[in-house]
Amino acid sequence: MTELQEIRVRLALVGARGSGKSAALEAYHETVPAHQRSPLTRIGDLAGKTLVYDHAEFEMGVVSGLPIYVDVYALPGQREAELARRISLSGCHGYLFTADCRSFAYRKTLEAFTELKSYLSDRGREPKDAALVALLTHADKSKSGSNKAEIMLLKELGRDRLIRVGEDTRERVGEAIKKAAALALSREREELEAQRAGKPPPRLKIPGQLIGDVERAHEIYLRSAGIAGSGFSPHSDPFFGQVLLQLGAASEEDLEVAANLKAQALGLGLDVTLEEILSKRELVDPEVLPRARRVHHCVEVIHEEVLFGRVASELNIVPFQRVKRALTLQVKRNFQHSLDHLLTRAGQLDRVARQRILKRLSELHQVELARDQEADRAGTINPPTRSFRAGESELPLFGEVAINLGLITRAQAREAVTEQKRLRRKGTRRFFGEVLKLKGYLNDEEIPMVCRALEERIADDRIEGYQIYRSLGRGNMALVFAAKQIKLDRIVALKILDPKLLFDSAFIERFAQEAKIAARLNHQNIVQAYDVGSDNDLHYFVMEYVDGVTVKDLIDDAGVVDPDTAIDIVIQTARALDHASKHSLVHRDVKPGNIMVNREGTTKLCDLGLALRTDRGGTGDSVVLGTPFYISPEQITNDPNIDVRADLYSLGATWYHMLTGRPPFTAPTPEEVCIRHLNDPVPDASRINTAVTPPMIRVLNTMMAKQREDRYESAAVVIRELLKLRPNAGGDEHREDLARRIALAYPAREPWD
């Protein structure tokens, strides 16, 4: 243990919004000689209110020959700022609770004190036992002992720890700070000693709601910062609009309307926020709005923490790897400790270094606020971002995102590029992220962070020759986008392997196999394959763009699909399976979500990610592949001799779902569903939907027979049997009718909308 050179105490000014915390800190700061105080650091929002904290350090004399330095943090009081309060409180030894003495402020004062009491309780403290002093602000507006806040605090703390402050008695703020510091030195000796010894901070209880908000905020931060890099800032109204969008509190169209109205208001000199416009016009879900505020504030706090670490590293104050370790610990502990606190306890920060970081942090924050003001005036919900198109950067996309998130340095990324090229010359292909992992620059906890952020960057036109318009969703292994194939000037569906699977060569091989299988098929009821390749370490597969809806959409929206339409869809899908079977292919994942119906009423079977070539022997799979609600018994038992009859079983289960609005077998777990497929008879669909006839039941039960020998021997036989029930099913007239219904229920949308 190093010899003690100074005594350091941290105090938090905490209280309800508008109780005078920042004003009290500023007032005391002005009375202290410049050589006994640090500059006042403000990390505020666009409106000038405290966002994370206001901070100043004061020299408070000498004890036993050692100088005493007291850091005072004025914390935000708004309800949604709980993370900002807790992350600073975790490193504090004493507390100054600011209580507004005006009668109208009592309710908010009580709420703020109740929260502080709960926090102290989690640390094993009662208010009377803690280093807690109450600062009664606006005390000149009421008589001593005549207001509820003072009476409440008198019972909790006693008269000697209540200090009244008014316009003419602001110098008493210093008295309160000194008293709280003295209490901290006497009552928090064990914690002060643990901090000096470099012991990690104790774990604290975190409210469940806050954990959920922090996790969602961290997800949003990864995706947003991974795109924008150093240009990212979360303080603007456009970014708040993105949070509302991701939480489903408002639609993109409504946000654009509100953003344009705000721009017009600003042009007229009216100061109004996006939230105010959305609320007034009832364009936002009022039940989700409070959570959106909390999540947005959490993103802002997380951003400031990452920025603190980046500055500490760039100023060569803390080694990059130490900053990374501290950031990783923050994520593990849901950001319950500040990076400042963690690095100080680890002996990485002294007073002078910390002041350098805070000075630079404040400068960067002001630059961000200025940039965000411009974004607010622009009248758009899309925050400005950096765009790295293929070929523009010296590094693979994975590396750029990892750098943007502060997980690797540019020098480390360049070193990994060199290593990747060396391996390729030797005949070994390695994904760039895998090279970073092998060199020890990324660990198993950091890689998923990059992958989640990478999903957003993929949509930034990263595939050479394709312009990406929008996301269409995701399949078993991939993200799917609507895009334009520039050379041929046609709209396509661009399927890109999920970033988290790039580390697994088996998934890469399966993805390539899907493309090869799709290329073997050319049928009007199967989505056509166009192209396959890899670019910038991303593996892609280009397919026909289907303008329509899935059968799952039809079921979800209507509850059930009428028998005539259902038979029409089953016949068209069976034709696709018959074609695949003639090319020795089994789909293995026939289900409502993998059957689309386009605007001409034509059914398209898609997603061949689990398809198997039957002309090459057994499955070779050691795990069960398929979707539990629709999987065939032989897939469950991993039968090596699987054939088209497995797909007919799944098509039967899909048909059952269309007719009844529910899968044939349900259970609490996937394993139990599979057991029911093996043992239970198919439920009678006519008991759920009286429009289902006995002949339909007969065909359905045959398709879903437990033993494949008892099913129809081919898809062609299924088609023949169904045509006996509906002679014109699958024909032009039925397709036209289906097309009309889809047009009415699902308005056309351009791929770029």
Image (cartoon, rainbow, N blue to C red):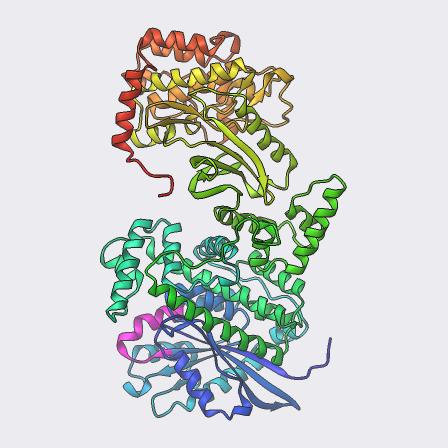
* Outermost right residue: 426
**Is the stretch drawn in magenta largely helix, strand or loop?**
helix
Q: Is residue 677 above or below residue 294?
A: above
Total residue callouts:
0
Q: Residue at x 33, y 70 (%)?
A: 108
Query: Is 413 in front, or is 167?
Result: 413
Q: Position of residue 462 (x, y in %)?
A: 52, 46
Query: Is 495 in front, or is 530?
Result: 530
Q: Is residue 616 above or below residue 597?
A: above
Q: Position of residue 669 (x, y in %)?
A: 49, 31
- Magenta region includes residue 184: no
Magenta highlight range: 99-114
Quadrant into which the N terminus falls: bottom right
Q: Position of residue 25 (x, y in %)?
A: 44, 83
- Magenta region includes residue 102: yes
In the figure, is residue 137 to the left or right of 178? left
Q: Residue at x 59, y 60 (%)?
A: 406
In this orientation, does residue 634 appear? yes
Q: Residue at x 63, y 61 (%)?
A: 324
Query: Is 73 in front, or is 495?
Result: 495
Q: Residue at x 30, y 58 (%)?
A: 259
